[in-house]
């Protein structure tokens, strides 16, 4: 397993647990943490023993969003360049930040976000790239970039409309207002709300274990098909899944799942 300075990472029972680990900074996303998130999810995607990923935060908050030191570093770097090259370099840096969060979506394993405390700005961009989101009752959310004179540029404006609807996203993006776990559940941003952080982590573990017991090949297929469907027509999506199943329905996983069902036992799948 790779080692990280701003993440706690462990694997057990086919579940990778990736924890943001800057609790003294409310897990604010600095340059190192941002880079390590991308590296961790590339690792999770490539590791056969990982079937599901749980993403959480150490300390009192999931994450307070982007660290202002990272913003200042970026502005200082591009500020030394001449016009034209300055804007070109800034765009490249923004795309690099986007690529990190894209790694969660491209990871073939389901990613479950366990959110407690603050989930603000860049942190909301981060969880928008997850497959499912769960929250504790005290969790607070905000699409805060407007208050900093910025257009959110690492995923929220692109992914959230598919989760909660365009009108809701426009309101949150234009106002920057905070909202709680109850409203997040009502909007469809989170799948479930738990009373406290302990129950949140326990509940998400149960869901992750349920997924980890399924055919890894099938679970990866579901994620890839659903990601494809989002960006294509229904007809294209149906064609894609037909091709996928034509290739995968003859797998040992399918045979084992059917046989286990007939024999009324728990199936056993290879990584």
Image (cartoon, rainbow, N blue to C red):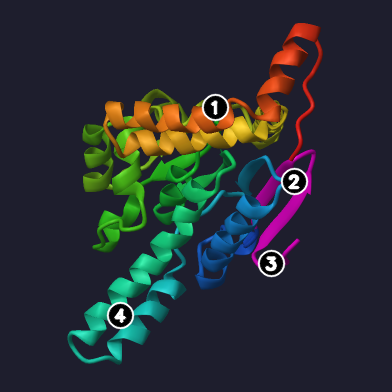
Q: Is residue 87 positioned above or below 152 on the image?
A: below
Q: Which residue is mark 3?
A: 4
Q: Is residue 207 left or right of residue 66?
A: right
Q: Residues within 10 Å of mark 1 (few under 14, many from 20)?
A: many
Estimate the x, y position of residue 251 in percent, counting from the top left.
65, 30
Q: CA gap, disc 3 to disc 4?
A: 27 Å
Q: Which mark is residue 71?
A: none
Q: Which residue is mark 4?
A: 89
Q: Earlier in the sequence, mark 2 or mark 1?
A: 2
Q: Which residue is mark 1?
A: 193
Residue drawn at (56%, 60%), measured in percent from left and top? 37
Q: Earlier in the sequence, mark 1 or mark 4?
A: 4
Q: CA gap, disc 2 to disc 4?
A: 38 Å
| Residue 134 in view in this figure | no
Kindly indicate whether the residue at mark 3 contacts the one at mark 2 (C-beta within 8 angstroms): no
Quadrant holding the N terminus: bottom right
Estimate the x, y position of residue 183 in percent, counting from the top left.
40, 28
Q: Magenta stretch: give its range.
A: 1-20
Kindly indicate whether the residue at mark 4 contacts the one at mark 1 (C-beta within 8 angstroms): no
Q: Which residue is mark 2?
A: 49
The one nearer the camera, 37 or 62, is 37
Q: Main secondary structure of the magenta part?
A: strand
Residue drawn at (45%, 46%), measured in percent from left and top? 129
Q: Is residue 64 left or right of residue 121?
A: right
The one nearer the camera, 131 or 188, is 131
Q: CA gap, disc 1 to disc 3?
A: 30 Å
Q: Is residue 242 magenta?
A: no
């Amino acid at each position: 397993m790779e080692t990280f300075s701003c993440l706690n990472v462990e694997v057990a029972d086919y579940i990778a647990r990736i924890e943001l680990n800057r609790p003294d900074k409310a897990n604010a996303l600095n340059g190192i943490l941002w880079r390590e998130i991308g590296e961790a999810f590339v690792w999770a995607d490539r590791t056969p023993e990982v079937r599901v990923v749980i993403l959480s935060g150490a300390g009192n908050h999931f994450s307070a969003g982007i660290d202002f030191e990272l913003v200042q570093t970026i502005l200082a770097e591009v500020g030394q360049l001449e016009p034209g090259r300055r804007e070109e370099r800034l765009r490249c840096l923004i795309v690099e930040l986007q690529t990190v969060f894209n790694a969660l979506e491209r990871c073939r394993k389901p990613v479950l976000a366990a959110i407690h405390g603050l989930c603000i700005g860049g942190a909301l961009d981060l969880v928008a790239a997850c497959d499912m989101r769960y929250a504790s009752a005290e969790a607070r959310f905000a699409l805060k970039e407007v208050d900093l004179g910025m257009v959110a540029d690492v995923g929220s404006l692109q992914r959230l409309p598919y989760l909660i609807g365009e009108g809701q996203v426009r309101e949150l993006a234009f106002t920057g207002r905070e909202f709680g776990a109850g409203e997040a559940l009502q909007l469809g941003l989170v799948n479930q709300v738990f009373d406290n952080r302990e129950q949140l982590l326990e509940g998400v573990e149960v869901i992750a274990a349920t997924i980890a017991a399924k055919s890894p090949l099938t679970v990866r297929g579901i994620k890839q098909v659903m990601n494809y469907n989002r960006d294509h027509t229904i007809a294209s999506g149906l064609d894609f899944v037909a091709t996928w199943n034509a290739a995968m329905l003859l797998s040992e996983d399918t045979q084992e799942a059917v046989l286990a069902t007939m024999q009324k036992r728990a199936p056993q799948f290879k990584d």
